[in-house]
Image (cartoon, helix red, strand yellow):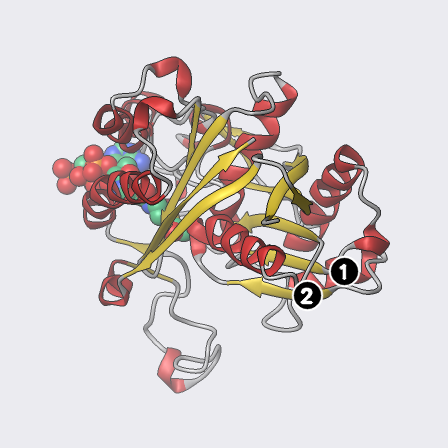
Amino acid sequence: MSIRARIEGVGHAVPARILTNDELSTMVDTNDEWIFSRTGIRQRHIAGPEDTAFTLSLVAAQNALANSGVAAADLDLVIVGTVTGDMQFPSTSCLLQDALGATKAGAFDVGAACAGFIYSIANATAMIESGMAKHVLVVGVDLLTKIIDWTDRSTCVLFGDGAGAVVLSAVEGSDRGVLKSVLLSDGSGAKHIHNEVGGSRYPHGSPQAEGRCHSVYMNGNEVYRFAVQAIGDACLKVLAEAGMTPDQVDLFVPHQANIRIIESARERLNLPKEKVFVNVDRLGNTSAASIPIGLSEAAAQGVLKPGMIVLTVGFGAGLVWGANLIRW
Ligand code: ACO
């Protein structure tokens, strides 16, 4: 009998501090009207000095474990999708594994920017379906506000911080679980969005790093063009591979970067507005955290019900993109 990876629990965490568009407009030359009309964002939660990828992940993971009924000690694997881990190494997943007491779990981070959760779910599903793991914790977490240039109005208005987590377990004889995933990439687009200093090419403090951008660089127009095409393509591909059509989707939880990008995907899939989960207005772009936070909020609001067909899609720096199709 075939094994499925079923989502048994969800949880999330965001920092307490809220930064509104009005407050941002006292920091850089911008205003609520511009930000809201171009992005759909009204406010975002931003990390304080004490918040890190680990601290937010820990709360989200504890919530997801409690919601699932799976004990940390029974986890076989901890996967964290992030590009803003606590340190270059060790991985944030190892810090989390230790704090949770997941004593028999392997742990690794996945670096796929805003698609980190999509990639992590695909990894977890493959591990479960192959029989390598029974219980897997997947976290998507990012604190991009720690690495953006707060004087650059073209990027600093877009991002917020947060973490979302799910627990997946192996189930036999159930039609509920992750049905299909598609993962895609185009590294030739690395020039459009990156944070180049701090790695082995331009180490911090090195002559090579001098004059380079030490924070997030983004060509917004190029990323926008790419995203609009890529997410529609990924959604149609994952649906086709599952032998399904867009009208069978009950809930669409896309990466929350910009309401106009979400709207273009909704139109291409011909989905009614009530089937699309949106929280970009309250949280901004939380990168790898946006989809699991969306799932966790939808579950808490009673929007997500067992048996629903849920389509998730993400895109980000790499360029990378992908989608997961889930029977909830
Ligand atoms: N406030 C006021 N004006 C601004 C601001 C601001 N915050 N930012 C830019 N502007 C100005 C520009 O300077 C420009 O002025 P000009 O015409 O005088 O030159 C004008 O507004 C228009 O700028 P555009 O960049 O063309 O605005 P656009 O409508 O394209 O919106 C945006 C920009 C919101 C960034 C959009 O391109 C976008 O959402 N791109 C995708 C970003 C994204 O999704 N990233 C996700 C990946 S993140 C990851 O992987 C980590």
SS of the residue at dot 2? strand
- Amino acid type of the residue tagged 1 in the rendering: Gln
- Amino acid type of the residue tagged 2 in the rendering: Ala
Decide if residue 87 is on the left or right side of residue 211: right
123, above or below 8, in the image = below
Residue located farthest toward the bottom when viewing the structure as drawn: 207
Could you say where residue 68 lies in the image, as x and y percent from the top left?
75, 36
Q: Residue at x 59, y 20 (%)?
A: 305
Decide if residue 279 is on the left or right side of residue 56: left
- Res. 97 mark: 1
- Res. 107 mark: 2
Which of 320 and 180 lies nearest the eye of the viewer? Answer: 180
Of the two numbered discs 2 and 1 on the same chain, state the one appearing first in sequence: 1
Could you say where residue 324 lies in the image, as x and y percent from the top left?
44, 43
Asked whether residue 130 appears in the rendered view, the answer is yes
SS of the residue at dot 1? helix
Q: Tell me the quadrant of the picture where the C terminus can be found.
A: top right
